Image: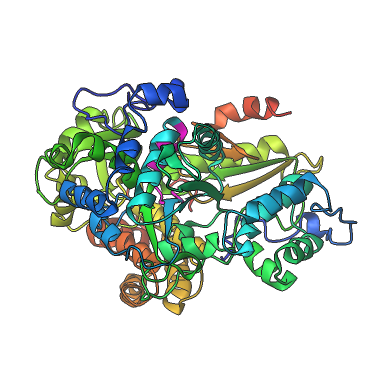
Amino acid sequence: MSHGPSAPSAAPHGQSHDHEPYQPVFTPGSARKQELDDLKTRYPDKRACLLPGLWMIQQDRGWISEDAMREIGEQLGVTAAYVKGVVTFYTMYHQHPVGQHFIQVCTTSPCLCAGADKVVEAFLEHTGCKELGLTSPDGKYTVIEVECLGACGFATPVQINEDYVENVTPEKVPEILRGLQ
Amino acid sequence: MGYPHKSHPRETPVLSKHFGNPEARKLETWKSLGGYKALQQALTMDPVAIQNVVKESGLRGRGGAGFPTGLKWSFMKLNDGKPHYLACNADESEPGTFKDREIMRWTPHALIEGCAIGAYAIGAETAYIYVRGEFTEPIARLEEALKEARAAGIIGNNAMGSGKKIDVWVHRGAGAYICGEETALMNSLEGKRGNPRIKPPFPAVSGLFGQPTTINNVETLTAVPHILNNGAEWYKAMCLSSPKSTGSKLFSVCGNVAKPGNYEVVMGFSFKEFLYDLCGGPLPGRKFKALIPGGSSVPVITIDEAESVKMDYEGFLEVGTMLGSGGVIIFDDAQSMPRQLARLSRFYAHESCAQCTQCREGTAWMTKILERIVAGQGTFEDLDTIFDLAENMTGKTICVLSDSCAAPVTSGINKFRGEFEALIKGKRSSTVAMGAGV
């Protein structure tokens, strides 16, 4: 997957977070370990649990660090390098910490027709994020452009963490931000 | 009921009948609406008999390729002693397409029933629904519905008391358009990078986990229970033009249009009536200019060409484009075609898996050149280069992603060359708002 100019391919503010201590997710006896083991029964090859396993890590730890890649690799019998190859292919796995509210604005053609570029500008302005992909100084927001969210009839759709917000216009942005916890 | 609009009298809501009704998500309500009757019947039938009903109905794949579904199912060699798999393609990522999302959000049980019947008809005990990672709400709806269906014994080791095992699982993707390509989807599901595979071997011979596999789109599978309930003749009768295109079809409409949304019409419906009546025509004070009718990967047509079209597989081919996924993107007279096509090209460049040179380099260079033209720094030679690139991007790669980038761009230049030339000459058309660039 080649990253476009909008994808967060570099650590925010140039800081590396890989020195930070990693808390394993799939410790013996943990609920996550059980969940992963249950999942393995759905597939003839446990490697199929890699994407779901990475989702579990991201949900619990917020991003996928090198240590996390090693951990899930050990669980599924693949190397950390193999896991990295997979993680870097997909756009939704964060390879560095992101803001508390990860805001993805769809700007593909149908949304561009509806003025998505102005929605991006409004989010950048109101979150205090200086640039796409950089986290705001207070750590609360990261804004990126995203390719087609598959909700083109509700332009402009914006995904904030797990949730879609539809029919977003620049005028609605301050209110949307106020509604975030 | 349509969504997000009330059903138009000229629509034929079969799949979309319960869109917008949250009650329809519940198993109890769904059963009272006739849900799972078709599965019960299917489980008493021979798998080949089910394949034959679907063949007779004329149902064709709704994901974009339009391949006959019953025929695809018949490629699966039954009783060969191998595990078979059904993969439901719910990686809906084609710009302009948002129909499968509504099926999953509003009628998850309809898809589960279609998956269970499809799995049984191809001799599979396991079906995976591969849903794009961004679709968290559809995933949650499906998970809730699967939990209910499993608890009620509809799916599981003894599906509806038939003694047959049918499992249906949801598998979440993680953001990659290319995983909607069937062989990339299989790789992704197996825990690999989503690179498409070279065919042959075809999935029916060696697919998921190296075993015989069928991949069907969400809308295709959701149509199957209706065909079993009402018969092949009923489905075949839903046809207003070419007999090769039957049934109802969901069209997603977006872009510069008064009423964007999903509309379900019978194959062969008048595109002119569809655009101006059902979808409410252009925005106030504007005129339709061009559209891409089948998701962003098909050639651009002008509004004049569109007005003569009968909405079926053959009808769109007649004007040099394709029905594709049924995602209609409309551009009005305020839009700059060079700007829109440059943005579309950037989409493909971003989504290229980078396996094939023609695609990796082609989509990136096409984007670079188009963006240069939009910025007022292009040359006439650039237009020739684009056509040269496009030729190398078409029919020469493992999958059709690079073809899908070339098709809208070259057709768009052919039909709106004046807009490109005006930018190159530095004379921006006064009727075209350029915005801030791409």
Which residue is nearer to you in this view: A68 or A12? A68
Q: Is residue B96 magenta?
A: yes
Q: Residue at x 22, y 35 (%)?
A: B265
Which residue is nearer to you in this view: B58 or A178? B58
Which residue is nearer to you in this view: A42 or B354? A42
Residue B368 in percent (x, y) is at 47, 67
Which residue is nearer to you in this view: B210 or A7? B210
- Quarter of the image where one finds residue B212: bottom left
Residue segment shown in magenta = B91-105
Residue A93 in percent (x, y) is at 66, 55
Q: Is residue B17 visible?
A: yes
Q: Residue at x 64, y 56 (%)?
A: A40
Please determine whether, in this image, residue B219 is positioned above or below residue B151: below
- Quarter of the image where one finds residue A19: bottom right
What colour scheme does the image use? rainbow
A65 left or right of A122? right
Please determine whether, in this image, residue A53 is positioned above or below residue B141: below
B160 left or right of B64? right
Q: Is residue B169 magenta?
A: no
The N terminus of chain B lies in quadrant: top left
Residue B114 in percent (x, y) is at 36, 42
Q: Is residue B328 visible?
A: no
Q: How many marks?
A: 0
Please determine whether, in this image, residue B234 is positioned above or below residue B49: above
Residue B149 in percent (x, y) is at 49, 34
A96 left or right of B34? right
Q: Residue at x 55, y 45 (%)?
A: B134
- Quarter of the image where one finds residue A160: top right
